[in-house]
Amino acid sequence: MKLMKEMLAFKPVNIGQWPDLQKLFGPNGANGGCWCMWWRIKRSEFDRNHGEANRRAMEAIIRSGEVPGLLAYLEDEPIGWCSVAPREAFPVLDRSPVLKRVDDRPVWSIVCFYIAAGYRRSGLTRLLIEAAVDYARSRGAATVEAYPVDPETSRVDPGEAFTGLIDTFRRAGFTEVARRSGRRAVVRYEVAAAPQR
């Protein structure tokens, strides 16, 4: 099924959407109990927190009033997730030699996607990217950054593609600004220079 933007609703996740995020992620917490905490906490803490502790950590973020990302809905059913926030929300990025800052410009970061099984390969990731850019723009972002993998340079297991594929970002108007490893790039969308979607 090919999804179109007009078929969907995109909502920033606040406490009202928390039950829907739990429903989408399911009992396994998205990818093996990650609850989208991979870029938010130290690896040692993440490994200890797999499952319920990560779920509680994500709930605490939402209850604090921070919006960790967007949900996509089809007929009131949550079918996709995109984690987008100011880069400072994802401190693990700066610990990575591959994903360290390109420069000192303030950016928003798109770090993760989770798509319900029945909607993969439907175009939803690109629609979530566009919605994330629109949301970041509405919050004053000038630049949106992401860290997709490039299947042209090395084999990518499905579980590794949670940050998205580079071609999807290119089709959404992002350009590569850094590549410190063959498999993963840093791409950017300049919000201020682009027309509203």
Image (spheres, rainbow, N blue to C red):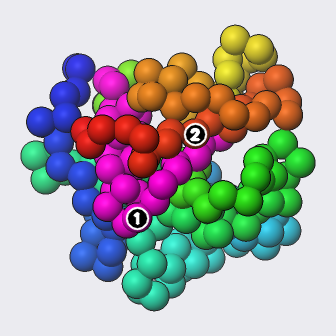
Q: Please, is residue 183 above or below residue 14 in the view?
A: above
Q: Is residue 77 magenta?
A: no
Residue type at the position of mark 1: Gly
Q: Element under label 1?
A: loop
**Which stretch appears magenta?**
122-147
Residue in front for this viewpoint, 31 or 106: 106
Q: Mark 1 or mark 2: name the one nearer the start of the chain.
A: 1
Q: Quadrant of the N terminus?
A: top left
User: Could you tell whether 171 is left or right of 151 in the image?
Assistant: left
Q: Quadrant of residue 70?
A: bottom left
Give the structural element (helix, strand or loop) at label 2. Answer: strand
Say which residue appears at 40% left-offset and 57% top-offset.
136
- Image label count: 2
| Residue 37 higher or lower than 59, as above or below | above
Residue nearest the observer in this picture, 38 or 101: 101
Give the residue type that dot 2 points to.
Arg
Asked if 137 appears above or below 66 in the picture, the reply is: above
Left or right of 137? Residue 164 is right
The numbered mark at residue 130 is none
Q: Residue 59 location in percent, x, y?
A: 47, 78
Residue shown at the point (79%, 31%) measured from the top left: 179
Residue at (40% x, 34% y) in the render: 125
Structural distance between the alpha carbons of marks 1 and 2:
16 Å
| Quarter containing the C terminus | top left
Please tell me the numbered disc located at residue 140: 1
Residue 188: mark in rendering: 2
| Coordinates of residue 159 in the picture (x, y in percent) | 63, 35
Nearer to us in this view, 185 or 77 = 185
Image-quadrant location for residue 17? bottom left
Q: Is 140 contained in the magenta span? A: yes
- Can you see residue 148? no
